[in-house]
Image (tube, rainbow, N blue to C red):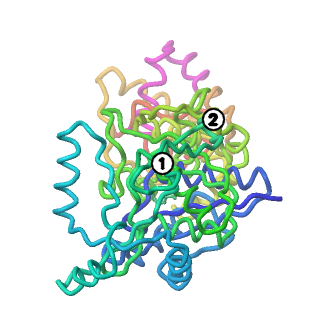
């Protein structure tokens, strides 16, 4: 059976490199197995979720090259959660609780003061009908907890109950359900928490592999119990490590700085971002990989390191430059046309300047150097004036080719005796206005005789 995976962001901000890591590990896994990739918006938090963030997530994924096979929104699936919660209630596995958050807080503190784990004592489970009615008459509305299957006969006496799975990334894992509080699935106002919606969707959408960050490992113990309580077989799980910044801080949707949106606006190539998001924390070096297919060949879930991976945002610049230096003309033709680089010379221009571009957009500055007017004439040392006069007198007639530079400088060498830097630096300065740049042999035929003569320094 081909796998079905899902990426389930909450649309509460722009996605960043860390979110993309999860999306790509799912996407590459699905691609390698001929599987299905679902994008599911976990948008039941109506206060923080926004339609425009969902839109931007779709756009940002498309920019990377991820096009989901299906898109779902949890906010449109409430009736499925209602049905599942009703079935749990009917089985006695979802019970009403009336404690306020202050009361729960005090209970937790008391337990911790006694050196005990702050696990909910299931007090609400012991309430009789009359007591519940009295609490409701006081104006309390219940929240609802899932009764974890961690006891033999008496729920007040939990016993060690290990939920185990063979994690696709981390290998054999175990969570002891007796160490956890019964999770709240439904809030007092009737709204659902993440856990029930996620499990119901994963079951109904026939997700076969859940690949997500390792901040969800404990949730997985609870979720496997919930899958079973709802009569479903739990899927396979893989928990990848999280990325942190160099100072060890986690990435947040709120910071915005490493969002895909800002990287894209900054002229970074999608494959530079995808390579970094995926290859950090894998064995092997972080290189700019030119396509998602090639990236997929580099990724094996079981190779991902178990501890958090520090991630240096500056790496994206290096990877971007690596990619740009290797781009052939076809990869940038549209963008050069949009920059008004003359079509018939665009390919030769790109091949001449690409090694001097950290971003494709840097080509605009070289377009001005080659095809435009130089911003300011260079200032030359006294002794260079005579040399440049001779040089421009010797400028060969067109047609020009890559050999013209050699021909021209050969003639100058013979006429003036200059060589090396003393020969080419004044020429570079006169022709480009800059001390550094692409090979002059490549630039000269693009500049052409007319523009070159116009750059002849005035005496
Ligand atoms: N919305 C959840 C998150 O972003 C999804 C977790 C999951 O993949 O189950 O953390």
Taking the spot 53% from the left edge, 51% from the top edge, the residue there is 152
Taking the spot 37% from the left edge, 64% from the top edge, the residue there is 13
Taking the spot 26% from the left edge, 78% from the top edge, the residue there is 131
When the figure is inspected, residue 459 is found, relative to residue 251, above or below; the finding is: above
Quarter that holds the N terminus: bottom right
Q: To which quarter of the image does residue 249 belong?
A: top left
Frontmost residue, 322 versus 422: 322
Q: Earlier in the sequence, mark 1 or mark 2?
A: 2
Residue 157 position, x and y percent, is 41, 50
When the figure is inspected, residue 316 is found, relative to residue 76, above or below; the finding is: above
Residue 194 position, x and y percent, is 44, 66
Q: Which mark is residue 171?
A: 2
Quarter that holds the C terminus: top left
Q: Which mark is residue 177?
A: 1
- The overriding secondary structure of the stretch rendered in magenta is helix
For label 2, the SS is strand
Q: Which residues are magenta?
A: 409-433
């Amino acid at each position: 059976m081909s796998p079905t995976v899902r990426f389930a962001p909450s649309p509460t901000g722009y996605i960043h490199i860390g979110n993309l890591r999860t999306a790509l590990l799912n996407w590459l896994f699905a691609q390698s197995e001929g599987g299905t990739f679902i994008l599911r918006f976990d948008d039941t938090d109506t206060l923080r979720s926004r339609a425009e963030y969902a839109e931007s997530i779709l756009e940002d994924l498309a920019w990377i090259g991820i096009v989901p096979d299906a898109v779902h929104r949890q906010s449109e699936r409430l009736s499925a959660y209602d049905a599942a919660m009703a079935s749990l209630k009917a089985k006695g596995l979802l019970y009403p609780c009336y404690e306020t958050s202050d009361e729960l807080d005090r209970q937790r503190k008391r337990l911790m003061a006694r050196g005990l784990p702050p696990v909910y004592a299931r007090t609400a489970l012991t309430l009789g009908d009359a007591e519940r009615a009295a609490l409701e008459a006081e104006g309390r509305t219940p929240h609802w907890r899932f009764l974890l299957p961690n006891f033999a006969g008496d729920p007040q006496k939990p016993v060690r109950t290990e939920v185990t799975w063979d994690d696709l990334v981390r290998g054999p894992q175990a969570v002891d359900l007796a160490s956890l509080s019964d999770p709240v699935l439904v809030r007092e106002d009737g709204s659902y928490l993440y856990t029930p919606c996620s499990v119901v969707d994963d079951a109904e959408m026939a997700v076969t592999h859940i690949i997500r960050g390792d901040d969800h490992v404990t949730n997985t113990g609870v979720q496997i119990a919930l899958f079973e309580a709802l009569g479903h077989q739990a899927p396979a799980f893989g928990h990848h490590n999280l990325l942190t910044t160099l100072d060890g801080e986690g990435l947040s949707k709120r910071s915005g700085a490493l969002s895909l949106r800002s990287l894209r606006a900054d002229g970074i190539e999608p494959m530079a971002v995808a390579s970094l998001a995926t290859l950090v924390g894998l064995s092997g070096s972080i290189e700019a990989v030119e396509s998602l297919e090639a990236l997929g060949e580099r990724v094996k879930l079981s190779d991902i390191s178990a501890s958090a991976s520090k991630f240096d945002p500056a790496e994206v610049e290096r990877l971007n430059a690596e990619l740009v230096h290797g781009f052939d003309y076809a990869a940038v033709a549209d963008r050069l046309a949009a920059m008004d680089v003359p079509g018939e010379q665009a390919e030769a221009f790109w091949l001449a300047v690409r090694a001097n571009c950290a971003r494709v957009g840097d080509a605009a500055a070289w377009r001005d150097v080659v095809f435009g007017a130089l911003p300011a004439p260079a200032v030359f040392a006294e002794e260079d004036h005579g040399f440049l006069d001779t040089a421009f007198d010797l400028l060969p007639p067109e047609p020009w080719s890559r050999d013209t530079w050699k021909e021209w400088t050969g003639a100058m060498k013979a006429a003036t005796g200059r060589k090396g830097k003393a020969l080419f630096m004044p020429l570079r300065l006169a022709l480009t206005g800059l001390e550094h740049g692409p090979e002059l042999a490549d630039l000269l035929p693009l500049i052409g005789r007319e523009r070159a003569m116009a750059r002849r320094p005035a005496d």
